[in-house]
Image (cartoon, helix red, strand yellow):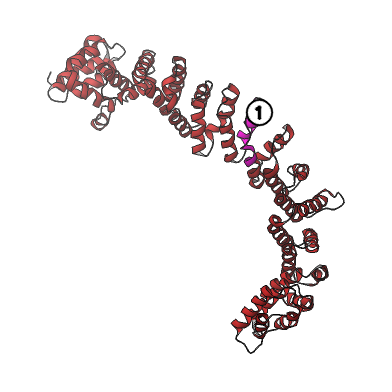
Amino acid sequence: MDATLKKFLKFLDPAEPTDVRQAAALLIAELAPGEAAVHPLLVLSLNDVDAGVRVRAIQAVGKLKIQDALPTLLARIEAGGEEASEAANAAAKLGARAVKALQDMMPKIAPGLRRYIAAALGSAGTASSDAAAVEFLLDKDPGVVASAVRSLISQVPTLSAAKKNSLAEQLLHLLKDAKSTLPVPSQAAAIRLLTAVGDKRAEPVLWERCLPPHPPEIRAAALQALGGIAEKLNKEQLKRLFACAVETDFRVVAPALMMLQHQTANDKTMPDWLALLKAPDVAVRRLALEKLADADSPEVAEALAPELSHADRSFRDAVVARLVTMSAGQKVLLSALLEALNADAAWALARMMTPLLKTLTKPHLDKLFAQACKFLDAGDRRADAFFFVLREVDAADLRQRLEEKALALRKKKDYEGALAHLRLLARDPAIGFDLRFELAGCGLKLSNKELAPDARASDPCLGQFAHLVLGYEADLIKALDKAKWLEPEDLFYLGFHFIDKDGSPRRFGTAVLQMLIKRSPKTKVAKDAKSKLKAAGV
């Protein structure tokens, strides 16, 4: 023993300060490999009054593999506390006898302490400790299993090829043994360890465990492992991945999705990719949409149709963007709009269709207009979304369609339907006299024609006629004379209201009542008109 080491041994004396004793234990562990003379003093230091010195001494006896320290280390493990973990790590390095002693302790100590031993044996790096750690994968305590596998995984990078091969064989034997029913945590741990080892022989075992009836924990671990070692996949393996991707448990879905990201879609796998559009998780649907980016067929377009109502807005937008570029996509979008269940859905589709509006053909517009008119007649708010689409495509064409429809309905004496279409046209302040006259006239036909002043003041059709009188008095009288569809009662109500005004409205009211008398001279309403004219001093 050299003089320096002897000097450090003196620093282990209890009379020395605690920091000196700690430093001495640490340095002796580094400087005294093979020096048996230092062993007794280090063993004595295991019982030092200072906890820091005891921990340094435990680390030193483990590093120097001092066999005489084993009883103290075992007692320290059994006592628990902070030193138990260090004592377990030190004891695991003392060889086969110590490993056997640690294994014998396992049934006799508390669960938390058992985890210390499992972790220590896994990280010791000796043949006997590795074998013992693998055995701990069978333990019923998930905490012990987790500790063992963490320690073993941390040691894998330092193992030689032969040791890795041996470890893989042990794990494969555990997983393939038909007589042993491994607990779920043990199977998952074994698979994680196989993944770390990276042995290709594990592939068949892993593929077998990625489908039911294996629990989700096992399946997820198997798929994660396959993601690191599986390369070219065959048809059956792809089928398994597709089956996993459409499940509800994201632990299974996520690793399957990661593997599918590296696959390409072709004619043979197209049905499988289309099936992913029905997956519960939107991430799976997004992947399917991405993989189908180059596919343009009616089958793909029809499969995308249900996704237009998906809850995720960004995904819906992505589906629309995809359909817009497809030859069959326009038909799908139109069908979806025509079949929208409510106003909100119709508006959502109408706005999403904006990129393709300019490509709509006349047959498409005819369908949209016909459906819009049905909704309008039924008082359904979906009509607004349809008219928005038609207006965005060609506003002039929509005006012409609405005008023709309104006139056709008025000629059929469907004044209510005509009025609904005319009101849409009236949203444009630039409409001319003819349409404004039609709007006022249809309103007059539907009016209750109550002669009380309050009722007339709130009648919208009289307000519309008042505006026409101010700007188009002569044209209005000519139009009324030609409008044979307006009956004597309509003209009487109109003239009765305006004859009591001043200026041009009075002139207009007088002309209307006189027109009525001329058109229907022998009717009761004509007699009433004459009485009104007389009462007004005309």
Relative to 477, is 390 on the left or the right? Answer: right
As drawn, 497 above or below 162: above
**Residue 218 visible in the displayed image:** yes
Q: Position of residue 151 (x, y in %)?
A: 70, 61
Quarter assignment of residue 395: top left
Q: Which of 266 and 172 is in front in this view?
A: 172
Q: Nearer the viewer, residue 167 or 9?
A: 9
Q: Where is residue 70 in the image (x, y as percent from the top left)?
A: 78, 76
Q: Residue furthest right?
A: 179
Relative to 386, is 2 on the left or the right? Answer: right
As drawn, 56 above or below 286: below
What element does badge 1 sit on? helix
Q: Residue furthest bottom?
A: 15
The amino acid sitting under disc 1 is Pro
The boundaries of the magenta stretch are 257-279
Q: Where is residue 169 in the image (x, y as percent from the top left)?
A: 81, 51
Relative to 44, is 470 on the left or the right? Answer: left
Q: Which residue lies furthest to the front in this view?
A: 2
Q: Name the residue under label 1.
A: 271
Q: Where is residue 505 in the image (x, y as percent from the top left)?
A: 16, 22
Relative to 265, is 191 on the left or the right? Answer: right
Q: Is residue 270 rendered magenta in the image?
A: yes
Quarter assignment of residue 521: top left
- Look at the image and tell me in which quarter the C terminus lies: top left
Q: Nearer the viewer, residue 406 or 154?
A: 154
**Residue 340 visible in the displayed image:** no
